[in-house]
Image: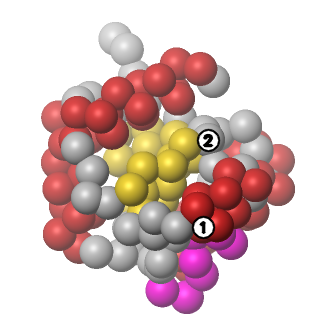
Amino acid sequence: MKTRQRILLVEDDKNCADLLHYVLVRAGFQVDIAADGLQGQRLINNSANPPALVLTGLILPYIDGYQLLQQVRKTENWSQVPIIVLSSKTQEQDIVRAFQLGASDYVTKPFQLGELLARIDCRINES
């Protein structure tokens, strides 16, 4: 039996998190949800078994997505995990900064679910 790949979703908007959780589970993924950056950081620091992918926002309570990008990239077992940023920040400087800090991909809100799933599949299959 094939094990479901796990995704860490860091999203503070409950409606968005619920929608993404529903869609990702229906697509066959196991989803761990962190409702803010601090919860995301705790999951990164306390899990020796990293997920197949991290999907995170940038504007998060307590610890922002930029800090999470840095945390993932400097954590030994997590450093090669693909990270997709899902954000309403559309300024070039924000997108460039995310890539400079280690984002694998960047999707702006509002987003298309089919496109997001294709990007997730692409990033997971690359790693």
What residue is shown with label 2?
104
Q: Is residue 62 magenta?
A: yes
Residue 63 visible, this angle:
yes
Q: Is residue 25 magenta?
A: no
Seen in the picture, residue 87 relative to 53 is either above or below; the reply is below
> On the image, which quarter does residue 36 sit in?
bottom left
Residue 7 position within the rendered picture, expressed as x and y whole percent measured from the top left: 44, 44
Residue 34 visible, this angle:
no
Span highlighted in magenta in the image: 61-68
Task: Identify the residue shown where x is 41% and y is 25%.
Answer: 121
Q: Residues within 10 Å of mark 1 (few under 14, many from 20)?
A: some
Task: Identify the residue shown where x is 46% and y is 69%.
Answer: 89
Local secondary structure at mark 1: helix
Residue 55 position within the rendered picture, expressed as x and y whole percent measured from the top left: 46, 51
Task: Identify the residue shown where x is 26% and y is 58%.
Answer: 110
Disc marking residue 94: 1
Residue 90 position within the rendered picture, expressed as x and y whole percent measured from the top left: 46, 64
Q: CA distance from mark 2 to mark 1?
A: 14 Å
